[in-house]
Image (cartoon, rainbow, N blue to C red):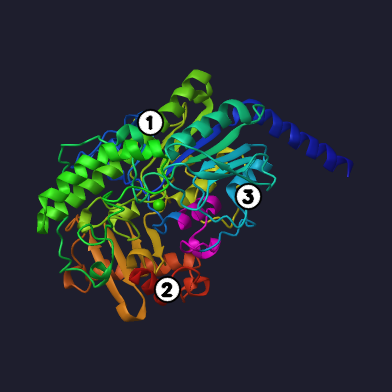
């Protein structure tokens, strides 16, 4: 007994010694639906925008080119990050599910190990319980609006919440609250882990007052597949509802102004959009010209929303510099998934195809990560919880399903690092009508199965032969060997991750039913 006490005291001493200086702080900057095509550090053929502040993290750290998401949609990816587990293990398979906050999450582990933990901004794992494992939380309600957001504040992390109404542009407000926590609220004797999570650039892409007219009078480049006809694809590519030509509403296109603005905000808005909208109404566009106009309106509002996120990143980096915190703080920029910027004629996400599978991810860690380095390993938000545990000196729990990225960040990727990746999307029926599918991706090939009874079929993608993913090579003689290998790999991964044979989403059906979806559509 006596010896155990001595041991415990020594353990406490060692944790508090580490807490005093060595253990790094972690700042996790997260945005919602930010496509890598809209981060200038990723380059790319279509140079759409400049994000100098986000790029700075990559220039002073590591840029990941193959960060794959497990289930390309908002709530589920947040649950993956909290738990380090696939959706079928953490129980949050689709938006509308309720996150079970009583389960093991990395913020709880860090808090117990002496970290000060905070989340500010978009939470999106439900309001049925406050975020668990945080010393402080101030989060949007649901998706949250772009202007004047009500937020739920839990100042001491004790589960007592109050509703606070803010007036202003949500991205700017999240930036201000983040800096306020860093400067004034946190316990400065502890290392900290801060998640600052933006609503932008989620649909319906409402820019802040500063950027309402940016790119007016300029035509941004179109993706080569804007007018794709899906003739060489399986039926799910045709039956989705995320087409720029057909599925954007007047509200998306800003032909109707946003709701919930103050009188002054609405006047500023109308001064910017009124003349543009009048010119559009007078032009009476049809056919391809109308689609092109819709694309321009969509892409500009999307990118305008991102400019404010980039500003917020700039303010945060400036504060880290001036406070001296930069030196011992790991800073991460990431989005919950990718997004379609007109590729295949689409907006939104959900598919295993490149633009929604890959998410932007970069890490600055002074003294550890080589500045300006680029990484091509297959990494995933599934690995974040494990990484944060290792950084904090916590043994990674054996039931987490990813792998710590610390060695990868040091430029020493282990030889047995994953060479292929399991993906699974569950939300059908639901928004945008993307059919349920799972698959394996190895950086060049993808083997995909749409497995619902009425559409059950396989797809084989070869990114080298068909980089825009417009063809299905499944069943072609030339691909017989590749196909066989990928089938085996898919089976191996489903066993490794303990994926149930029957779709677990069936028992979690709390979102749309076909009848409810139809009702909403008919409104
Ligand atoms: Ca999202």
The image quadrant that residue 12 belongs to is top right
Q: Which residue is drawn at 47% across and 49% down?
A: 144
- Examine the rendering and report whether any part of residue 53 can be seen: yes
Instruction: Name the residue that disc number 2 marks.
Output: 516
Callouts 3 and 2 close, C-beta under 8 Å: no
Q: Is residue 359 highlighted in magenta? A: no
The vertical placement of 432 against 314, above or below, is below
Q: Residue at x 15, y 41 (%)?
A: 219
Q: How crowded is mark 1: few (under 14 residues within 10 Å), some or many (20 or more)?
A: some
Tell me, yes or no, whether the two marked residues, 1 and 3, touch with CB atoms within 8 Å. no
Label located before the other in sequence (1 or 2): 1
Nearest the eye: 301 or 115? 301
Give the label on residue 199, or none: none
Q: Which segment is the magenta one?
A: 75-96
Residue 311 is tagged as 1
The answer to whether the beta carbon of the residue marked 1 is less than 8 Å from any atom of ligand 1 is: no
Q: What is the distance, in whole Å, between disc 1 and disc 2 at their CAs?
A: 40 Å
Q: How far apart are marks 1 and 3 (CA)?
A: 29 Å
Q: Between tags 1 and 2, which lies in front?
A: 2
First in sequence, mark 1 or 3: give its number. Answer: 3
């Amino acid at each position: 007994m006596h010896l155990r006490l001595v041991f415990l005291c020594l353990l406490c001493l060692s944790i508090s010694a580490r807490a005093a200086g060595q253990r790094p702080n972690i700042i996790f900057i997260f945005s919602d639906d930010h496509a890598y095509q809209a981060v200038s550090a990723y380059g790319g053929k279509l140079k759409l925008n400049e994000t100098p502040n986000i790029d700075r993290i990559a220039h002073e750290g590591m840029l990941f080119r193959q960060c794959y998401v497990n289930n390309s949609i908002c709530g589920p990816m947040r649950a993956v990050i909290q738990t380090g587990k696939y959706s079928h293990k953490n129980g949050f398979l689709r938006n509308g599910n309720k996150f079970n906050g009583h389960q093991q999450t990395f913020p709880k582990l860090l808090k117990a190990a002496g970290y000060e933990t905070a989340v500010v901004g978009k939470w999106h794992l439900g309001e049925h319980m406050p975020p668990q494992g945080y010393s402080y939380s101030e989060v949007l309600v649901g998706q949250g609006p772009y202007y004047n957001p009500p937020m739920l504040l839990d100042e001491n992390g004790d589960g007592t919440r109050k509703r606070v109404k803010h007036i202003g542009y949500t991205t700017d407000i999240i930036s201000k609250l983040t800096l306020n926590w860093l400067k004034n609220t946190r316990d400065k004797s502890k290392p900290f882990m801060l998640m600052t999570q933006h609503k932008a650039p989620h649909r319906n892409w409402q820019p802040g007052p500063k950027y309402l007219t940016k790119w007016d009078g300029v035509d941004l480049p179109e993706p080569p597949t804007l007018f794709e006809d899906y003739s060489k694809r399986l039926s799910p590519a045709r039956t989705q509802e995320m087409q720029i030509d057909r599925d954007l509403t007047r509200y998306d296109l800003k032909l109707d102004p946003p709701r919930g603005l103050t009188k002054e905000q609405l006047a500023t808005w109308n001064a910017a959009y009124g003349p543009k909208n009048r010119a559009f109404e007078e032009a009476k566009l049809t056919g391809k010209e109308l689609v092109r106009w819709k694309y321009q309106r969509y892409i500009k509002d999307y990118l305008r929303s991102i400019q404010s996120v980039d500003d917020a990143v700039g303010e945060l980096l400036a504060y880290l510099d001036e406070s001296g915190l930069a030196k011992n703080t790991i800073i991460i920029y990431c989005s919950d998934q990718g997004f379609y910027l007109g590729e295949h004629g689409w907006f939104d996400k959900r598919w295993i195809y490149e633009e929604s599978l890959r998410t932007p991810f970069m890490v600055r860690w002074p003294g550890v990560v080589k500045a300006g380095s680029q990484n091509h390993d297959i990494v995933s938000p599934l690995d974040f919880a494990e990484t944060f545990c290792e950084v904090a000196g916590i043994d990674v729990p054996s039931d987490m399903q990813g792998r710590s990225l610390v060695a990868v960040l040091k430029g020493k990727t282990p030889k047995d690092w994953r060479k292929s990746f399991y993906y699974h999307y569950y939300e059908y029926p639901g928004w945008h009508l993307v059919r349920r599918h799972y698959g394996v991706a190895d950086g060049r090939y993808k083997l995909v199965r749409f497995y619902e009874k009425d559409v059950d079929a396989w797809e084989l993608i070869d990114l080298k032969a068909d980089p825009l993913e417009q063809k299905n090579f499944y069943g072609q003689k030339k691909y017989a060997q590749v196909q066989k290998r990928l089938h085996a790999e898919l089976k191996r991964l489903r066993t490794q991750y303990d994926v149930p044979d029957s779709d677990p989403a069936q028992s979690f059906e709390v979102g749309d039913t076909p009848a409810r979806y139809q009702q909403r559509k008919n409104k």
